[in-house]
Image (cartoon, rainbow, N blue to C red):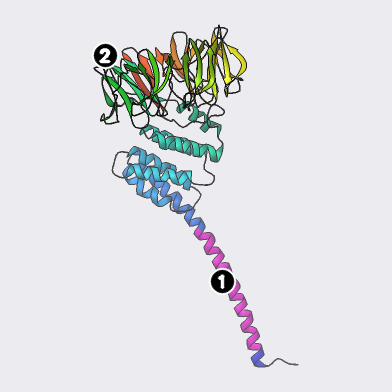
Amino acid sequence: MRETKGEKILKRSSRLFLVLGLVAVFAISWIVVLTAQSADEKQAELIEQAVSYFNDEIYVLAVPILEEAIGYNAARTIEAENMLKTAYLNMMGQPGVNSLYLDLLDKQMNRANAEPAIFIEAAMFNMSRNRFSDAFAILKDGIARTQSEELKTLYENSRYEYRMGYSNFDEVTQATGGAIGVRRGDFWGIASSSGSLFIPCDYDKVSTYSSGRAVVKKGGVIYAVDNSNNRLALHKDNATDFGNLSNDRIPLLEDGKWYLGNGQLLRGATAFDELGMYSEGYAAARNGGKWGVIDLAAGWLIPCEYDGIIMDALGRAYARGAVFVKQGSSVILFIDGASTGQEFQDARPFSSEGYAAVKKNGKWGFIDITGEVKIDYQFDDALSFGQHLAAVKQGELWGYISVAGKVVIEPEFLEARSFYGGSAPVMIDGGWRFITLLESETETTGGGLF
């Protein structure tokens, strides 16, 4: 059958449309290719313009060019970004430049394939601006995302750097409850754990600060004060001395005997020859020449039949169910009121940190709550861990180790106390000062976060 004229025209039109369609697809493909190429080329052109300004150190004119260049998602974007950061750094101090630089760092760190180097750059910049919390947060984020050993090393090498405070005291006790007793001249006051005085050095004696109050003595009068040095309670009985306040219990000395008092300075009826400070609900006590450990109701957890109970500078003996008992020339570890049979030459009480300093063969090391040696006997003296750091003495000077046993603050102090709240009192020539860690967050395992 012969085609009609109309059919021939329709057939030719179909072929024409097909050809035109192919041409259009081809043209669009070339436009895409040419556009992509022009983006690369345009970016390269902008970078070259910026380079000429860089050579003349004219950064203020290079910045807008580079800001345009990074707007292209092209081959040299990272190069343009790094040049832009350099320009920002050379203009640092001018209005808004600091924020622009930090925004660009954030952009680079937030990429899925961010390299460790960018986290290092950001951390070091923040450290240079004394923004240490930001710097350490960046390092920890970078470690979590990249597992970079370089980042881990930088973090570990930086986290124990510290600032030395300006407060200076003649004597200090040990920080607890966010506060510490301090002495200037003949009189005592109470400072924050970083050394900022909030109860003035006006008193003959001060207790520890607990539950919003401390007990003080002035001119023979014993009373309690709050953190603004307002009087809260007055002791009206015949006590002439007192111990440290904790768990709403404070030892009160009357007629040669020690009685348990409370925060209102009212004393109970049970008398002891000596009393320590309560910690975790227990305190060391002596009667009839022998020592034991009592609970909050003055009942005996460990009967008073031993030569002594190991206490710290505040009079605390008990933590995490553990206490060290003296019997003859030995110091014995007790857990939950019962002897473990493990003996030492000397010891320091456990703290909530979980490692205690113990002495054998003339040297000090550290054990955990099971009695297992965690850090070998190697130090001339030591305190138990506080905030996962322990003060240790090597030769004549004190420094600090981590729970991995690594010296992280070199021995350079005449004396040292345990860390609390990121700070620790240390003695240097001229008196006691406070050091505060740049990074106070630590973990209990592995000697660090990683």
Looking at this view, name the residue that lies furthest to the right: 1
Task: For residue 82, say whether it is visible.
Answer: yes
Q: Looking at the picture, how far across and down is residue 314, in whole percent?
A: 41, 19
Left or right, 443 with respect to 183, comes to right
Image quadrant in which you'd find residue 179: top left
Tell me which numbered mark, 1 or 2, is placed earlier along the sequence: 1
Q: Looking at the picture, how far across and down is residue 348, in whole percent?
A: 50, 16
Quadrant of the drawing holding the C terminus: top right
Quadrant of the drawing holding the N terminus: bottom right
| Residue 24's disc number | 1
The span from disc 1 to disc 2 (Cα, nearest Å) is: 96 Å
How many numbered marks are there?
2
Front position in the image: 319 or 304: 304
Name the amino acid type tagged 2.
Asp
| Residue 186's disc number | 2
Judge whether residue 34 is colored magenta: yes
Helix, strand or loop under label 2: loop
Crowd class of label 2 (few under 14; some 14 to 19; many from 20; radius 10 Å):
few
Name the amino acid type tagged 1.
Ala
Determine whether 90 is above or below 436 in the image.
Answer: below
Q: Looking at the picture, how far across and down is residue 123, in whole percent?
A: 43, 35
Q: Looking at the picture, how far across and down is residue 202, in whole percent?
A: 24, 20
Q: Nearer the viewer, mark 1 or mark 2?
A: 2
The residue depicted at 55 percent of the width and 63 percent of the height is 30
The residue depicted at 39 percent of the width and 49 percent of the height is 67
Left or right, 184 with respect to 306, comes to left
Front position in the image: 381 or 296: 296
Which residues, given as a range, are shown in magenta? 8-35
Front position in the image: 138 or 189: 189
